[in-house]
Image (spheres, helix red, strand yellow):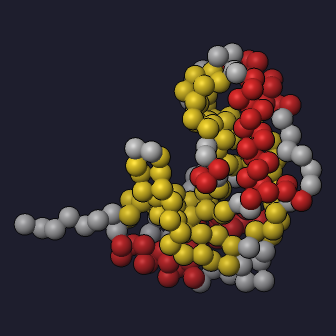
Amino acid sequence: MTEKIQKIRCFIAIDLPQESIEEIQRIQTLIKKQNLVGGKYTAPEHLHLTLKFLGEISPEQVQAVQEKLKTLAFKRFDVHLGDVGIFSEDSGDHIRIIWIQLAGQGVGELQQAIDGSLKGLFPKEERFMSHITLVRVKKAKDKKALMVFLKTIKAIPGPHNCLSVPGFVLKQSTLTLQGPLYKDLAFYPCSS
């Protein structure tokens, strides 16, 4: 009888500082107050930018990922909270996600560098979009009114909305009935 290998659900992400999380919570509250959408709002401890989802991988694969990511060299870069938008089903009728963009020059470059370093282990991201999930939508009561309202939301300018990215994290995600539990497996700091 062969022993079943324990798989580890992993992803690579940029964590957010507390000031940015508080600004995102303010925006989530604005959306809630409109009462135009029902769904699950992302908890503060789950707010992050996913650079690459790796899925369920073996401990050996985790080790290989860690070794590959150690070789990445990238400069510190600045980002800010940008526009609020949606992802919808292919037909466009059903809104799945309300998100806020994490905008800045270095995000796409870092994601591509991660993709490049993991070439041969994981497929390249086909459509990376720098976003943070605000709400997983179950039902939109008035899609048109919601879309109009979302276009009016802007992050308040200030230090909470300009963050310098010190590095990225390889995270483990354990799915539970209460929601996912995240654990940092490794931190990869910028080289300068």
The one nearer the camera, 64 or 25, is 25
Q: Position of residue 106 (x, y in %)?
A: 77, 65
| Side (left or right) of 102 relative to 89 | right
Q: Eyeballing the image, is 111 above or below 66? A: above
Image side of residue 55 versus residue 36, left or right: left
Q: Residue at x 40, y 44 (%)?
A: 177
34 in relation to 188, above or below:
above
Whether residue 54 is visible to the viewer of this picture, yes or no, is no
Image height of 126 relative to 63, above or below: above
Residue at 73% over, 44% down: 25
Residue 9 occupies quadrant: bottom left
Q: Quadrant of the C terminus?
A: bottom right
- Residue 127 or 70: which is nearer the viewer? 70
Residue 76: in sight, yes or no?
yes
Q: Position of residue 91 (x, y in %)?
A: 57, 24
Percent across and percent down for residue 27 are 77, 39
Q: Is 146 displayed left or right of 46 in the figure?
A: right
Q: Which residue is located at x 85 percent, y 56 percent? A: 160
Asked which quadrant contains residue 19, the reply is: bottom right
Q: How many marks?
A: 0
Comparing 80 with 128, the one in front is 80
- The quadrant of the rendering that contains the N terminus is bottom left
Classify residue 71 as left or right of residue 67.
right
The outermost residue toward the left is 1
Which residue is depicted at the point 66% across and 63% down? 14
Vertical order, 139 against 129 (above or below): above
**Measured from the top left, where is residue 183 in percent x and y?**
50, 65
